Image (spheres, coloured by chain):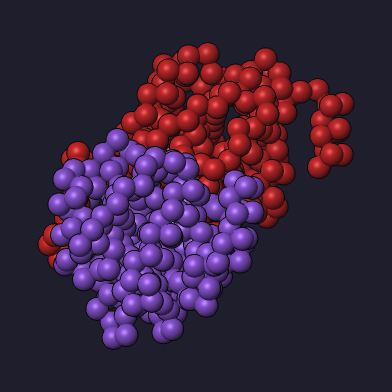
Chain colours: A purple, B red
Amino acid sequence: ELLQSLQSLFEAPRLAGRRVLVTAGPTREPVDPVRYITNRSSGRMGHAVAAAAALAGARVTLVSGPVTLEAPAGVERLMVETAAQMQETVMAHLPGADIFIATAAVADYRVAQPAQQKIKKQGDTLDLQLVKNPDILALVAASGDRPFSVGFAAETDSLEEHARAKLENKRLDMIAANDVSGGQGFDVDDNALRVFWRDGDCSLPRQSKVTLARALVQVIADRFQMARGQN
Amino acid sequence: ELLQSLQSLFEAPRLAGRRVLVTAGPTREPVDPVRYITNRSSGRMGHAVAAAAALAGARVTLVSGPVTLEAPAGVERLMVETAAQMQETVMAHLPGADIFIATAAVADYRVAQPAQQKIKKQGDTLDLQLVKNPDILALVAASGDRPFSVGFAAETDSLEEHARAKLENKRLDMIAANDVSGGQGFDVDDNALRVFWRDGDCSLPRQSKVTLARALVQVIADRFQMARGQN
């Protein structure tokens, strides 16, 4: 790792002068003042991507849900809790962003009417009505003067089919997909990714999230420069 | 803190030869392979109580839901995820326990039918049907040859009324209550407690969870010895 850090000192920084906006971690959607719905995202992949983009010379803003990780060196990190707060913070930092990398596992649904008091255990059953959250990535990709937009997909089955459907439907420039069928990818140190764009794809084999994120940022930088006609 | 540790060396260990079973942390109730319902419990109070009981000479087993804390020195810690797993592990370790201290914020409800595959974002709304979880503390307090049973209550209103109702309904020996109306008590380092038993109560003022736990264990040891007629 030291060797890689040293090597990177002698390479031209691929993203020098670029602004990169990254989301990471889960969101928490309150049920009442103490309970919430969330997911198994640790935020490690997003933090590693933010660190890798900074290492590649970019000015990086990381918008993170609740995680127990330190902020990566040289990265501006903004902590949020709910999907609504993540949307607000991302939108506020969108102007001027060249690349948007959405690694966060944003809750698809929130509780329609969170209780203001702790819900008492009463009936034998409880019906929780959920409503769909805004799709932050799709909103960013649909915005005027949109950044190069990269999504993440965690899939338990039909990985390429589901990932390519998201690439199309959300009008993304790229999507990185991983197989979480065996709990893989969530809350672990290692990961593997398949990366898809309109007319191509590549596979990044299983490795630590830190080195995987560096490889992914290289792929993103390549495609970003192609898209901007700078290659 | 060093001074307190030294002092405790010269005091007779209040719980020498006693077996204490403690629960801590939240539980996670799966919605699907990646999503779950949980709560803001950090497990700090329970870990501090387990450490304090060990310091008081007890042999301590700590059954903890998912937390980011280290196991306290000299404590046997068993990690679980769901309320069902916590129940199973507590019941397996109940025989021989003298004192049971239930600090865990066990989920009152679980999802009736967790999905085997990750739920796809489809409709604009989603109805989540929850069913009541077993009440581990009430089961322990109702068991034959029951240990001295101490509950915890996090309340947003009518603290004494709600706490005394739990003391009665679950047939506890003692209950420690804290006010979480302002987010207080959950996921913070400080806490204050009011402790109730059938014919008395005491207040433990705001302090670090570490010193608060030591004070609470002294109160528990007092009442335990009264109950066992050893005072």
Query: Which residue is at a point 47% across and 18% down the rendered structure image?
Result: B93
Question: Relative to B197, does residue A122 appear above or below in the rendering?
Answer: below
Quarter of the figure with residue B225: top right
Q: Nearer the viewer, residue B20 or B142?
A: B20
Query: Which residue is at a point 18% across and 43% down the rendered structure image?
Result: A157
Q: Residue B67 in the image: x percent, y percent?
A: 51, 41
- Horizontal side of A213 relative to B131 (left or right) equals right
Q: Residue B141 in the image: x percent, y percent?
A: 44, 27
Q: Residue A142 in the image: x percent, y percent?
A: 24, 78
- Horizontal side of A146 relative to B196 (left or right) equals left
Quarter of the figure with residue A224: bottom left
Query: Which residue is at a point 71% across and 22% down the rendered structure image?
Result: B57
Quarter of the figure with residue A95: bottom left
- Horizontal side of B45 relative to A38 (left or right) equals right
Q: Quadrant of the C terminus of chain B?
A: top right
Q: Nearer the viewer, residue A159 or A136?
A: A159
Query: Which residue is at a point 40% across and 35% down the rendered structure image?
Result: B81
